Amino acid sequence: MSGPGPLTVAATWKVKPGKESEFEEWHRGISASATAFPGHLGVSVMRPGNSSGEYVVIFKFDTYEHLASWQESEVRRKWLQKAIQFKSEETRYQTGYGIEFWFTSPREPVPPPRWKMAVVTMLAIYPVVNLMNIVLKPVIGGLSPWVGGLIATPVTILLMTYMVMPGMTRLLSRWLFAATKEDKL
């Protein structure tokens, strides 16, 4: 796989019951090691909301070459070796470009159709952008639109990535991941 970058990887980990704290500690360690690699753009974790024991870890690299450097490294291999003791099944990986990482599901290895992702993204981003305009106006109202946008954009992205889109994906998962004839076209 090669492309214009950045690449997002969603790794679904099934953790043995009672081993969650070990996984959390391990995850902090491997994440710290990954940040030392060139091109690492961040990591986030979706913790299980029930007793499934499934964690979804999402990490991002700026180019395929940097991602491959991390994935083929001895450092990563050693961390993955340590994980054998607390995982209950093989880790599932999904790699993609763009906004597909917002639509990861522990139960669905394939993202929903692009038209559904576009609809949900529009439904989510419209209120967030308007809310940011209202909330941040007292702070950035006197600044130039360029500077104001420089402040509002990262706030919007963080909200979308860590709060809004995980919630929207869970809320609309039955519709997003429903297999219909139109979706297969």
Image (cartoon, grey):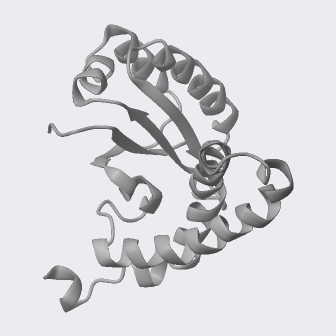
**Residue 33: x and y, percent?**
50, 14
Q: Residue at x 54, y 78 (%)?
A: 123
Residue 9: quadrant of the picture: top left
> Between residues 138 and 8, which one lies in front from this camera angle?
138
Q: Quadrant of the N terminus?
A: top left
Residue 95: quadrant of the picture: top left
Q: Is residue 99 above or below residue 3?
A: below
**Is residue 105 visible to the viewer in this orientation of the structure?**
no
Residue 26: quadrant of the picture: top right
Q: Residue at x 41, y 35 (%)?
A: 60
**Residue 58: x and y, percent?**
47, 42
Q: Residue at x 40, y 19 (%)?
A: 81
**Residue 142: x and y, percent?**
79, 49
Q: Residue furthest bottom?
A: 181
> Between residues 119 and 60, which one lies in front from this camera angle?
119
Q: Is residue 152 above or below residue 73?
A: below
Q: Residue at x 65, y 25 (%)?
A: 25
Relative placement, left or right, of 165 versus 67 is: right
Q: Is residue 72 above or below residue 14?
A: above
**Residue 84: x and y, percent?**
44, 27
Q: Quadrant of the C terminus?
A: bottom left
